Image (tube, coloured by chain):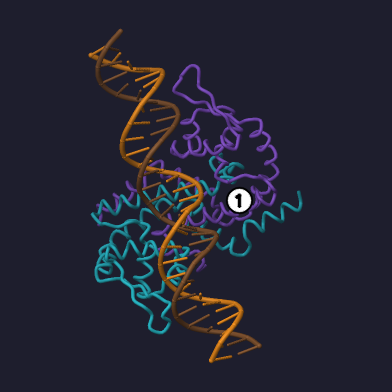
Chain colours: A purple, B cyan, C brown, D orange
Amino acid sequence: MEQNVIDASGLLAISTRLQRLSDQIRKDGLLIYKAFGIDFQPKWFPVLYTLYKKSTMSVVSLSDEIGYAHPSTISLLKELEKEKLIRSKKDKIDTRKRLVELTEKGKTLLSTMEPVWEVIIKATAEITNTENNLMKAINEVEATLQEKSFLQRAKVYMKNE
Amino acid sequence: MEQNVIDASGLLAISTRLQRLSDQIRKDGLLIYKAFGIDFQPKWFPVLYTLYKKSTMSVVSLSDEIGYAHPSTISLLKELEKEKLIRSKKDKIDTRKRLVELTEKGKTLLSTMEPVWEVIIKATAEITNTENNLMKAINEVEATLQEKSFLQRAKVYMKNE
DNA sequence: CAAATATATGTAGTTAACTACACATATTGC
DNA sequence: GCAATATGTGTAGTTAACTACATATATTTG
């Protein structure tokens, strides 16, 4: 199958390919929410969904959970606060911490979004359920990288050059 | 295998996941070039490699080839010109066109990079050759999306809600 | 218990892609 | 052969993540 032969340039440009695909999917995601008349940006999803599940979290634990650097989370939280979808309060025990949670408006939005998620999940499953499942591939690659980084692996080959 | 169960939030956050993986790989890529003492940024790869193979191209055809919007290519070309890795000249037939090519310095750099590519290709193959091959998955998803976009697929499910 | 270290949050500035718009030159069609 | 349209390049501004640094509060340790 010619289709499945991966050339060297593909492997070399893998980060570029991933980014492009990410952009493409994000743009369509936005359009889907729009089509449902929901004012929601795909980039908000990880934060809001995590708060939906866990109800209250500090900024850093939230960042860790979604895998973002904390300044990225802070800037998302700012946006979400402006939209009145989340609010925050000081942790009384550890006053360094800021505890974040959904507002009523946030909870309402999330629940109106559930039918949209159904659609997105189905469409995403449809496009990723090819011979090599993209989500599974991402999970596997992330697990592999956790064992031993890309750089460490490269170093092994460097020695043998 | 618990490991392979994809939850809904994974599918919903797919663009986020792709982007994060892309960032991670790009950063390590940069470190590999550094470890070889080569002054090279991974983002330059698609442009330089394409010029290496095709020798001379206009800005838009180059952009199409690498799958970038043309302003992105222009800003990369500016950087590469400053590095004296590429140069450009007017097309004598169609004077709107600017033809871009590698300089001698560019060609030299690319040839010193070949052993590094070997290493990157091997390390990338190592991390992507899991049960679901990431590169193949990307190729398959891109092909699937070309047939029918994410949005169009979602619309089918929207009607049935 | 005070000094050193660690953790939590926040700000500023960077990056690498993008879209929207502007303008010049080619091509097409009446 | 000129007007309308299409194509090629360029600029300006946006976006969504990042790193580096700053500061405040907690925790650990000698």
Taking C29 as reference, is D19 left or right? Answer: left
Image x and y of residue C11, in percent: 41, 35
**Quarter holding residue B73:** bottom left
Taking B152 as reference, is A71 left or right? Answer: left
Residue name at image x 31 percent, y 66 percent: B81
Image x and y of residue A63, in percent: 48, 35
Residue name at image x 38 percent, y 65 percent: B47
Q: Is residue B90 above or below residue A62?
A: below
Image x and y of residue A145, in percent: 41, 45
Report the amino acid beneath label 1: Leu
Seen from this angle, which residue lies furthest right? B160
State how many labels appear: 1
Residue name at image x 50 percent, y 35 percent: A65
Q: Which residue is mark 1?
A: A30
Q: Is residue B12 above or below residue D1?
A: above
Q: Residues within 10 Å of mark 1 (few under 14, many from 20)?
A: some
**Quarter holding residue D2:** bottom right
Image x and y of residue B92, in percent: 38, 83
Towards the viewer: A122 or C10: C10
Q: Is residue B2 above or below residue B77?
A: above
Q: Chain of mark 1?
A: A
Q: Quadrant of the C terminus of chain A?
A: bottom left
Towards the viewer: B142 or B129: B142
| Helix, strand or loop status at disc 1 | helix
Towards the viewer: A131 or A95: A95
